Amino acid sequence: MSTTTPAADGAAGSEQARREAAAWATWQESPWGRLRYRVLAVLLRERCAQLGPAPLRVLDAGGGDGRDALQLALAGHEVTVLDASPDVLGAARAAATAAGVADRVRTVAADLEDLTALAALTRHRAGGSGSFDVVLCHDVLQHRGGAQQVADDVATLASSLRPGGLLSLMAPNPAADVLAAALRDGPAQAWVVLDAERGEDPATGRSVLRLDPAVVEEAVGAAGCEVVGRAGVLTVTTLLEDAHRADERSVADLEELEVELSRREEFRRTARFWHLLARRR
């Protein structure tokens, strides 16, 4: 979860932000949270290998504590984690140091609106050859606002890519919300959720946009990118998300299954998260 959205003013807003951050950290450490990062890491490593040899220049926009970025740093890539929260960026640096890749991870305290300046700086340092090879933006867009804000954000993210570079976007899948509501609370609640514009983040309780991937694909095309990959992340897990029923063996077995299901079109629409990969033309 990114902290790139404005919080409420004053002490109440700060306390709310702390509660949300603590809830998110708890989910990250749950079996299902760890599984989300592991499955996506497989997909990203495969795609980055197709793009070219390490080191690639990677930007994780709204990257929080850098869990996605760290996997790519471990694969030999040079990663910049951008987030508005100094606290979570400190956690990202600590994780990079513990993993022995501190020299491949840098952090920038900034919001998505600062990406244009950051991309220009990267182009300058690269001798004008382009900006980032890969830009990640995961679990961010649903916190940012309506369709126009999403379109603006996608355009900004795309502008940070070199021609031919990859944009990786991920957010909760609205279809999974309906399935989860039906299983957890019954058909009546599923009807309530079905066409709702906003929903509740199950990890933090925060109100978020229910973001159809088709809307994002339209924004991707308008930003000068072509979709080259679609996947669903955590398909079976959507139906099993109960940390009390999980152990490391079951999570390991699920990981192998979830990676395979993420590659199959028929499972994509009901997965917990949708994932899009696009190439800048």
Image (cartoon, helix red, strand yellow):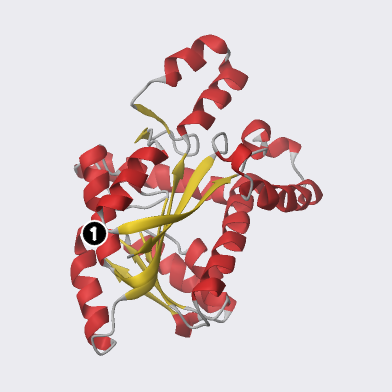
Residue at which label 1 appears: 156
The image position of residue 86, as x and y in percent, is 32, 64
In this rendering, does residue 84 appear at all?
no
Q: Image height check: is 10 above or below 103?
A: above
- The image quadrant of residue 9 is top left
Left or right placement of residue 31 versus residue 182 in this view: right
Of residues 13 and 265, the one nearer the viewer is 265
Of residues 245 and 80, the one nearer the viewer is 80
The residue located at (29%, 61%) in the rendering is 158
Left or right placement of residue 236 versus residue 203 in this view: right
The C terminus is located in which quarter? Answer: bottom left
Q: Image height check: is 241 above or below 4?
A: above
Of residues 220 and 33, the one nearer the viewer is 220
The residue located at (32%, 52%) in the rendering is 220
**SS of the residue under disc 1:** helix
Q: Residue furthest top?
A: 188
The residue located at (78%, 50%) in the rendering is 253
- The image quadrant of residue 237 is top right
- The image quadrant of residue 179 is top right
In this rendering, does residue 238 appear at all?
yes
Q: Amino acid at mark 1?
A: Thr
Q: Image height check: is 29 above or below 59?
A: above
The image position of residue 187, as x and y in percent, is 56, 11
Left or right placement of residue 47 versus residue 197 in this view: right
